[in-house]
Amino acid sequence: MQTPSPSREELRTLIDARRDEPGALLPLLHDIQNTFGYINAEAVSLLADALQQTEAEIHGVISFYHQFRTTPPARHRVQICRAEACQARGARSLEAHACKRLGVSMHGMTADQHIQLDPVYCLGNCATGPNVRIDNRLAGRVDAARFDRLMDELEGEHR
Amino acid sequence: MTITVYVPCDATALSLGADQIADDFVRLSAQTGHDIRLVRNGSRGLFWLEPLVEIDSGDGVRIAYGPVTGSHDVESLIKTGVLDGHKEHALALGPVTEIPALQAQTRLTFRRIGVTDPRSLDDYRAHGGYQGLEKALQSDAQAIVDAVKESGLRGRGGAAFPTGIKWQTVHDAQADQKYIVCNADEGDSGTFADRLVMECDPFMLIEGMTIAGLAAGASEGYVYLRSEYPVAADIFQHAIDTASAQGWLGDDIRGSGRRFHLHLRIGAEAYICGEETSLLESLEGKRGLVRAKPPLPALVGLFGKPTIVNNVLTFAAVPEILAAGAGEYYKHGEARSRGTLPVQLAGNIRNGGLFEVPFGTPLRTLIEDLGGGTASGHPVRAVQVGGPLGAYLPQSQLDLPLDYEQFAEANAVLGHGGVVVFDDTVDMLEQARFSMAFCAAESCGKCTPCRIGSQRGVEVIDRIRNKENHAMNMALLSDLCDTMVDGSLCAMGGMTPFPVRSAFTHFPDDFK
Ligand SMILES: Cc1cc2nc3c(=O)[nH]c(=O)nc-3n(C[C@H](O)[C@H](O)[C@H](O)COP(=O)(O)O)c2cc1C
Ligand code: SF4
């Protein structure tokens, strides 16, 4: 879904577009990750330069937030809600099923790097759980059978 | 005669296939030669009925059908003649406004939600939108603050601080720049009211923040929205752009000479960033470490300037308060809890969704009468109110009325109004363990009782489960809770003991 290894030029353009906004770092990290899938070492060094911070400071911010990543992502991210409202509707067993179905544990990536499985703390769809988010798409009332159909679709597109 | 078909566009309806339903209506109605107008309205918040389709076949009455779950339902509806004025069908619910679950509510903040098209500023204005701001533009700043005070409005994000007093502090502060910040981090499980506002009536939030700007003398506003809400981000950004293009935001609001600019910022999956000072750090581009208070954000807030930080629902209540008058809001509710609370019924509940009711309504009325009990049909065993830092209530406490002070007396919180229902299959030791594990995962790391204490909490609960030194470990768990309450800088570490304590106090059998 993302182009691998961004060029220095592309990163510069992204960073220059909003480096002067107040509190620009989070929007910039989002822009970089949305465009390239992750935040690589070169991006960190360019950000440090542009915002007059140390690389350690930029790393500190990246590591604080669950969303940001510094290694290439799988093609798709599948997130299963682990919060109380989904627990009350059977999310714990869905989580176990999902791990089995994909052959990975939570936070793991399938061997073909097609799907990354992550927990998420609440998708805000709490009356119609269990909930699953696939990239930017939300699916509600997901039982094991519906989960399998959703994964079939994702895997089908890969083949 | 125009036939109008309404298919909601909020994230819940979308998660249940609403886009497909909308496409089906367009495609199949063309095949049968019907000329329909498709409107993507907001959701009514009756989620057990979603996707909930409404059809006005020309007489101005919107007949509801739901849940419409796939192409087969759309085919069957059209074949029965719902586009030709025929109103009977297995999925028919009658005129939407007569659905009992809507009639039982007092919708002030949510009055337009589900009715209008959230992408249409004209629709917003046709349904009373911007009347509050029109009044605010005619008033002086102190009069706006006074109206908010008189309404009795308290913060809907969790701490229930009186909104008018906060606004007064920022109004009185002297500074070259002040800010209005909206907390749309909505991290609590079981809550989705902020999302519904932003997806279904985004101009209302813009209007409320603009009024706050006039009251405080602030010309810049930020909305900090969690990244788990991409639909809300899209619709809200569209609303900012539309309002700016039509002069409702910008350097000269509707020719008044007053300025207000609004920016949308996206979080990055960190629960603690819902805590207001952590949120401000995050907006400044830093790690979301909680700041010590004082100084209050009202005096030293975003970029060190005086700042109003309020929840989405708090700002969203303000346009109506100004338009209808503070007294109209204050007359609902009881004691020091005035107005209405948009309650979110979630978890194992038959009829889950958004229920805006006056304060004073008993919790049991919501869960049993409006919510219809559990979805599984099993008895209700525990109810967590107020998100992951809120207590678990047993059956014996379900008669508590929605009232901040009465909840506090019962060692519980109303928080953001999320109500998560569990049936009798719940294991309360597991829930207590989850609370500790959640705190350990989401702590900002600044204080030891929160960061390390929660980790120890998980271990102690594991030992209790394994029946190792039971009495000693129960005593240890209780001590640990005290240490976290006493030694934490913010409510993350300070309130995680609420769900834990309530679990072992009210459900001791699960800890044996
Ligand atoms: C751990 C933690 C998480 C919080 N999360 C939120 C949140 O997601 N949304 C929110 O509005 N307030 C949240 N709050 C409360 C805010 O700190 C703050 O009280 C609120 O934004 C003030 O707005 P209000 O007065 O309108 O409620 C949280 C507090 C804590 C301690
Ligand atoms: S209680 Fe926890 S989240 Fe709050 S400031 Fe301390 S370490 Fe951070």
Image (spheres, rainbow, N blue to C red):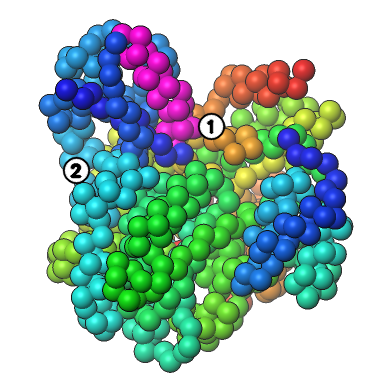
| Residue at x-position 85% and y-position 50% | A7
The answer to whether B289 appears left or right of B370 in the picture is: right
Location of residue A133 in the rendering, given as x and y in whole percent from the top left corner: 59, 37
Residue holding disc 2: B104
**Element type where label 2 sits in the image:** loop
Q: Is residue B70 in view?
A: yes
User: Quarter of the image holding residue B8?
Assistant: top left
On screen, B462 above or below B265?
Answer: above
**Does the magenta portion include B185?**
no
On screen, B170 above or below B472?
Answer: below
| Disc 2 within 8 angstroms of ligand 1 (CB) | no
Asked if badge 1 and badge 2 are on a common chain, one would say: no
Give the magenta-colored segment's residue range: B12-32
User: Quarter of the image holding residue B56?
Assistant: top left
Location of residue B404 in the rendering, given as x and y in whole percent from the top left corner: 32, 66
Q: Amino acid at mark 2?
A: Ala
Q: Amino acid at mark 1?
A: Ala
| Residue at x-position 43% and y-position 57% | B240
Residue holding disc 1: A139
Q: Main secondary structure of the magenta part?
A: helix
Chain hosting mark 2: B
**Element type where label 1 sits in the image:** strand
Q: Is residue B481 in view?
A: no
